[in-house]
Amino acid sequence: MSDFRTPLRRVRGLGAGGGTEHFWQQRLTALANAVLITCFVILLLTLMNESYEGVRAAFANPFVGIIMALMVVSATIHMKLGMQIVIEDYIHGAAKLPLLILNIFFAIAVAAACLFAIVKMSFGV
Amino acid sequence: MSDVKSARPLSPHLSIYRFSPTMAMSIIHRITGIALYVGTLLLVWWLVAAASGPDAFATASAVFGSFIGQLVLFGYTWALVHHMLGGLRHFAWDMGHAISKETSTKLAIATAIGSVSITVVLWLGILIFG
């Protein structure tokens, strides 16, 4: 087998496709998570001994709803990016692509379920 | 060229690496990240239960309030705090600080002590004032 392509031609396109975009999104959501998840932990501490009605009253507050929704979006993007790296580092072969797809679906499913619950409670339905 | 094989060990080769705090924190950062990933299902459960109604919420509260539930939440708190401190360490590195061998080792040890301390203080507060 003779390959007439130059070594440079053979390796082009095999690197990270998105450039620094993955890194940037990871750090951006990390910064957002640090703030938003701290807010969430404080919310949990205040709701610790609350009744069901108390929890629902808290989630009827627009500020709580917005912070919670932002946290869910930021955290699920962050965890999708992180798990993608873990898969790319350790899984090679046939399982890689299905796992990468599953990772995206899992993150979106978590986000969808959380956001639905938050919106439902925000509107008091 | 890439077909050249040699008997020399390739890096990363875990068995020939000497243990170091920065290495341990790197591995734990990844493990806590994976734990937090799976643990988001707990958040989904809690939110969906609260949105569903009093019965579903009572069930979730009972499980989270049980001994096993509290143990899981304690572990999840530590994973969260550790991963967050690890992330802040990454921010320091990104901006060019604390990269030297000595400083990064100190920072790695500080991360471990810090995450355990914050988690214990947080939960002592919950047990005392909760």
Image (cartoon, coloured by chain):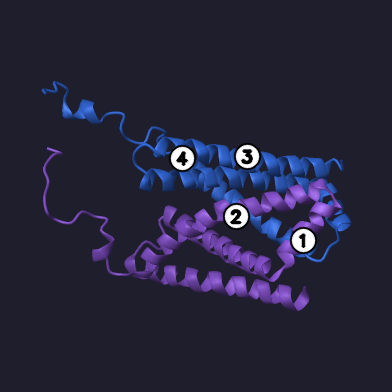
Chain colours: A blue, B purple
Q: Are marks 1 and 4 in contact (CB under 8 Å)?
A: no
Amino acid type for the residue under numbered disc 2: Gly
Amino acid type for the residue under numbered disc 1: Ser
- Tell me whether marks 2 and 4 sit on the same chain: no
Question: Which mark, by number, is residue B39?
Answer: 2
Amino acid type for the residue under numbered disc 4: Leu
Q: Secondary structure at mark 3?
A: helix
Give the alpha-carbon distance from disc 2 to disc 4, as whole Å: 18 Å
The chain letter under disc 2 is B
Q: Are marks 4 and 3 in contact (CB under 8 Å)?
A: no
**N-terminal label among 2 and 1:** 2
On screen, residue A29 versus residue B129, left or right, reads: left
Q: Which residue is mark 4?
A: A99
Q: Which residue is mark 1?
A: B61
Task: Decide: few, some or many residues near mark 1? Use Cα within 10 Å; few <14, some 14-19, many ≥20.
Answer: some
On screen, residue B68 versus residue A91, left or right, reads: right
